[in-house]
Image (cartoon, helix red, strand yellow):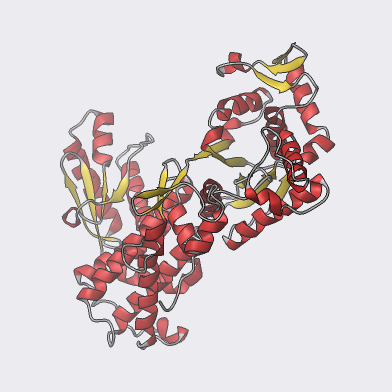
Amino acid sequence: MSQLKIAELVSQALANLGIVQPLDYRIELAPRRELGDYASNIGILVGRLLKRNPVEVAEQIAKECLNLDQGNVCSRIEFAKPGFVNFFLNDGYLQNNLWLILEQDEKWGELASSKRERILLEFVSANPTGPLHVGHGRWAVIGDNIGRLLKAAGYQLETEFYINNVGAQVDRLEASVRARRAGNEVPEGGYGGEYIKEVQGETREEMLGFLLSQQRATLDQLGVKFDNWYQESSLHEKDKIGLAVQKLHDLNVTFEEGGAIWFKSSALGDDKNRVLVREDKRPTYFAADIAYHLEKYERGFDRLIDLWGTDHHGYVGRLKAALKVLGQPVDCFEIIIGQLVSLYRGNEQVRMSKRTGEMITLQEVIDEIGVDATRFFFSATDVNSHLDFDLELAKKQSNDNPVFYVQYAHARICSILKKSQLQTSKSKTNPNIQLTNLKEEAEKRLMLKLLTWPEVVAAAAELRHPHRITEYGKELATEFHHFYEHCRVLGDPARELLVEATRITLRNVLELLGISAPEEM
């Protein structure tokens, strides 16, 4: 919010100085308090553009921004080597924005609904042939949080789970279940997990339905909901795959060899050509993926976002190449590759379930540490990075555990406010409360951190980075604890109001992550 105000100042200052070329400058929180609240490298970029001394340019921009602002947002705007402009926010601006936080309440942090782009977000899409593993869990939480961020940023969003209910893996599942029931060995390449004994249903469809219902129950418990459950079988029933292959044939990008139909993907940057239809006339998963994504575009979405597991990394180029040949706007198709998870208990890696001696399922992790810790830890690392997940840390009731640390800050605030004068919504917006005394360094640091919340939401949504929300939550909790240690709250209406604004923001952080905000711990 304050960042946007400063960006508007800089933009107007550049226009007044006759600089109209688009520049990729940054406005960021200053690394040290003595350098202001925000800093921009604008002088460096303009200096390069105009071949002028960047420090002199920064000085000129700083003066123009100060003239435009007239003290409304900033108390000082200074320049510094090697061409930075530093912005010091006005105390009154920080103080008065507390009223905005109280007014917006649950909406605080949400952005204006100006982005009317329709987005389809597909994630998890696990084969319905067994329980979800921890990798699925991480992608489920990150996908769900990306969806929450996009909604908060004002996008029109639908979420989808693609059910792979056709193909060899389904044949192997049925054969495995029937073999176990007959007391026979599971066929080679089949599913030998203990869960196979628990599969119910007489037909293939009933078996798949049973396993899918278990997956859905686990996802529901984790707070992950989908707007659409799309079955691969519908592509076959409507001959969508055959039509997609025919379109590629008509564009002369297929050939027949050995009785199979191939896509000329090597001519489009792939390391080799890819089979679309096998010798026995069965389409490949690649052909089904092409048809499925064509169907997504046909539904009228402006942007497609897929979250895939790391084992699908090699599919990205060939799928985009096929869609591009078919005339689809692949620049509006994002594929996020989710990295794997390693489970630990302290320093010891956990590879197998104590109960079954096999892989640890997502459900077992949830049962052991709870939904909140599962969601927080799965969200806390960049999706592009491998995650080392310490189950023992996730269960700790101490500040070493980040989810406990953030939730405890919220609970502590609730305890303080129960003893305060802010007992009704009417008193929370009482204009007679004077905020001008909120000038202590700890108070200003907390107010600034609160004010950056909408900026964090905007950046996290734009970059598809939910871990920025967990980081902000930890930082806000730290600022609150620092403030509370240095400032007596009870009996001071202004400070009580600042604490209430902090409660609102922390609650919104946790809700955006799909995590509970406890009032007692």
Task: List x then y, in percent, for residue 466.
Answer: 45, 52
Q: Is residue 137 above or below residue 419?
A: above
* Total numbered labels: 0
Task: List x then y, in percent, for residue 26.
Answer: 32, 43
Please state if 521 lies on the left or on the right of 255 as rendered: left
The C terminus lies in which quarter of the figure? bottom left
Rendered image quadrant of residue 298: top right
Please state which of residues 265 and 139 is positioned toward the viewer in this rendering.
139
Furthest-top residue in view? Answer: 257
Please state if 493 lies on the left or on the right of 236 as rendered: left
Which residue is depicted at the point 56% across and 33% down?
Answer: 312
Task: List x then y, in percent, for residue 504.
Answer: 43, 71
Please state if 437 lies on the left or on the right of 414 as rendered: left
Which residue is depicted at the point 61% across and 58% down?
Answer: 218
The N terminus lies in which quarter of the figure? bottom left
Please state which of residues 372 and 321 is positioned toward the viewer in this rendering.
372
Please state if 291 lies on the left or on the right of 400 as rendered: right
Which residue is depicted at the point 51% across and 57% down?
Answer: 365
Please state which of residues 371 and 244 is positioned toward the viewer in this rendering.
371
Q: Is residue 147 visible?
A: no
Furthest-front residue in view? Answer: 183
Task: List x then y, in percent, for residue 273.
Answer: 63, 16
Q: Is residue 28 visible?
A: yes
